[in-house]
Image (cartoon, rainbow, N blue to C red):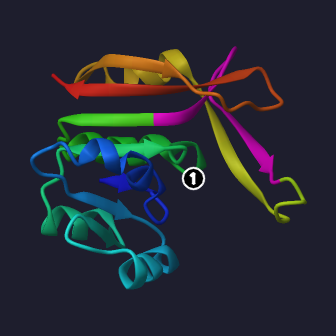
Amino acid sequence: MDFGGSLGSTYFQNRRFLESLPMVHWNIVEQPMFVDVGKKYFENDILKFYYDIESCMADQSPTTILLSSVIQYLEQPYAFLKTVKSLGFEFILFDRTSFIKKGGDRLTVQTVCPEIYRASYPCWFFDRKKFNSFFDDDYETIAEFQCHENANIPSFFKGLILKRR
């Protein structure tokens, strides 16, 4: 399950590698207008689009959830992560997730470069220790990696792969 997976960009970037696996189902949970477009133009036997986690879980049995540059944009990220943990995914993958270098979780405002379009979004930078400890009872970190994003506050972006204990 690719939560916040847009129109499948991560799937398409990795499709060549996924083709060697015996069976792949890539399920994207997104905002309604993305799902509508995805269903109309991109959906096939492998790539499916869903309006919410519940309908995806009812139709498929995903063992992994991918959260790529999405968790920091949720209003209540820890409440969402509590739900994710309760669903019992075997793996949780975080990519391009923002962490603050010092201090606790920090809510900021991200301003999009006006040349792209005019917008701003609330964006969380997580305290790494708090974030990791949130999963300690149920998941272990089996890999982590640096990401190349940056921000104008002392921070870093990481990817994590968690495996259910």
Q: Residue at x 15, y 22 (%)?
A: 165
Give coordinates of residue 37: x percent, y percent: 47, 81
Residue at x 20% of width, y 41% of height: 89
| Percent coordinates x, y for residue 47 in the rendering | 29, 65
Left or right of 121? Residue 80 is left
* For residue 66, side relative to residue 118 (left or right): left
Q: In the image, is 147 to the left or to the right of 89?
A: right
Please tell me which residue is depicted at 55% across the width and 44% down the height of the picture.
Answer: 69
Q: Amino acid at mark 1?
A: Glu
The residue to which callout 1 is attached is 75
Q: Which residues are magenta?
A: 95-112
Q: How many marks?
A: 1
Q: Is residue 64 above or below residue 41?
A: above
Q: Secondary structure at mark 1?
A: loop
Q: Left or right? Give the position of 79 relative to 100.
A: left
Instruction: Please check the rendered image and state whether residue 105 is part of the magenta-colored stretch, yes or no.
Output: yes
Above-or-below relation of 143 to 89: above
In this view of the protein, which residue sits in the foreground, 51 or 24? 24
